[in-house]
Image (cartoon, grey):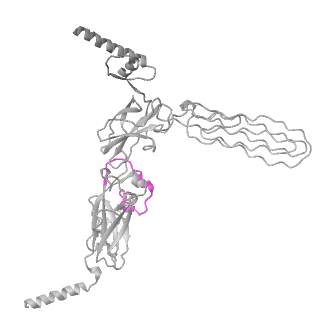
Amino acid sequence: MSRPQRWALSVVALSALLACGGDALAQTVTLATAQANPSRKNGFRSQDRYPLWISKADCLADDAYTFVVRVESLGSTPLFVFASAAGQDCSDPTTRSGANARCWKLAEITPVTGATSYSITVPVRDIVGGYDTPSTFNPGSTVDVCERSGSDAPLGVLLHFLPVQAAGGVVAGTGFQYNDIKFDLVPPSAPSSVTAGIGDDVLELSWSASSSTDVSGYQFYCDPAPGEAAPSSTTTVGAAGAAGAATSTAASNCAGTAGATGAAGKAGTAGASGAAGAGGSGGASFLAAGAGGFSGDAGAAGDAGAAGTSAAGAAGSVSGSSGSSAAGAAGSVSGSGGSSGAAAGTSGASGAAGCAVTGATCGRSTLIVGGTFGPAGHECGRATGNTATEGRTSSLQNGVEYAVAVAAIDNVGNVGRISAPKCLAPARIQDVYGVYVRSGGQAGGGWCQASAPGQGSAALSLGALVAMAALRAARRRR
C-alpha cells in the first residue's frame, strides 16, 4: 500500500471516530480560569487562619463552598462531585459504592446542552458528615456532624469532580481534584495553672500552655464583662404574698426565698353560692414567681347554711438547693362555692431551685469550668503565639472584682474550653516617689509598688527612708 493510500485510510478512521457522537470524545473538567479557588457563603477568614479550611464555627454556621467548573465535550454524561480522605482515589466504581466505599457523593449535575461551565455549591457539613461513614452517607447533613471529639489535628479532604457514565459508573474522560480543604472541629484543650496579679485597670495573667499541638494564641474572658457595672451584692425579698427574689452574688443566697402565706378563702354567704377562694402565692424562684391559682367556678345556689370558716393557707416552702432556675408552679385552684362557703385557698407550690454558682468563687456564674466555648461579649484580652504563657487583660475597672479565665485558640480560630477562673480586683499602681512628693517631700526616688487605697502612709514612710539614705550618703562624700 502506498503512503498516500495509508494517509487516506487514517483520515477515514478518524472521521468514523468523530461520527460516534460527543459522548465518545474525552470529557474534561477543570476549574474556571478566572477562579482558582472556590468562594464561600460566609466569606473567608484572614490568611493566617487557613481561609479554605473548615472550623467548628463554619460548620455551625452552615457555610458552603461554590466552585465554578469548566467542561469540554461533556455531552449527556452527568458530572459528579465526590469527597474522600486525602490521598484516596475515586475513579474506580468500587470506591464509590458498597460496604467498602471510601468516597461519598456531594453533588450531581445534569448537563445542559451547550453549557461550558457550571456553578456547584457544596455544604461544609456534607464534606464533614461523610468522613467517618462514607458507605452510608447521604447529602443533607445536620448540625450534629459539627460535634466531634478525639484528636484536634486537622483532617485533609480531597474533592473529585468526575464525569461518570450511568452504565457501570465508569469515569468517562478526565476529572479534576481539589485538595486545599481540611477540617478541624475539635477545639484545643484548656490551659492550666492560671494565676492572676493586679495592675492599674488590668489583671496580669500567667498560665501553663494547652497540651494541644495547633494552638495559635489565647483568649481572656472576664465576668463582669468589660464596661459592665459590678453586680449587686444585696438580697431583695418580694412583698408579702409574692415570690421572694434573690439577687445575691453569694452562692449561699442564690436560692429563692419562701413565698408568703396563702390568703384565706372567702366564706360563702348563707343561701348564696360561695365565692371562690383566692389562689395561694407563688413560691420563690431565682427568675420568676409562681403564678396564682385560678378561681373556682361559683357553686349553684343552695339552702341557707352556716358561714364557712376561713383559714390561712400554708406557707410556701423555701426553694431547694442550687440547681437550674425556673418559675414556681401555680397555686392550687380555690375551693368550689356552695351553701357552706368556699374553703381557704392553698399556698402556692415552692419555687424551683435557685441558680448554681459553678466555677468562679467570687459569685459569678458566666464562666463555668469546662463549660461554654468562649462566652460572647466577655472577651477582655488576648495573647498571640503558640508559646505564650502570660498576658494582660484590658478595659477593666479598679476596685471591681472580676472572675477571669483563659482559653486556647487554634489555627482556624476554634476557641477551647476555659480554664478554672480566678477572682481578683484591679488596683492602682502607685509610685513611691510620687506619693512622697505629693506629701511634701523633695528628695529623689522612683521605686514603684502596687498599693490599695489607704496604704499611702506606708509608701510615704518608705520614701522618707530612701531620702534619708541618700542624704547620709551625700554627707559621707563631703
Q: Is residue 145 magenta?
A: yes
Q: Residue furthest left?
A: 2
Residue 177's quadrant in the figure? bottom left
- Residue name at image x 84 percent, y 36 percent: 309
What x and y, as percent, mark residue 208? Answer: 33, 34
- Residue name at image x 66 percent, y 33 percent: 258
* Residue 80 position (above or below residue 383): below
Quadrant of the image containing the C terminus: top left
Please indicate whether residue 126 sits to the left or right of residue 228 in the image: left
* Residue 39 position (above or below residue 14): above
Quadrant of the image containing the N terminus: bottom left
Name the magenta segment's main secondary structure.
loop
* Residue 114 position (above or below residue 9): above
- Magenta stretch: give its range: 128-155
Q: Is residue 91 visible?
A: no
How many discs appear? 0
Q: Is residue 130 magenta?
A: yes
Please indicate whether residue 93 sits to the left or right of residue 338 in the image: left
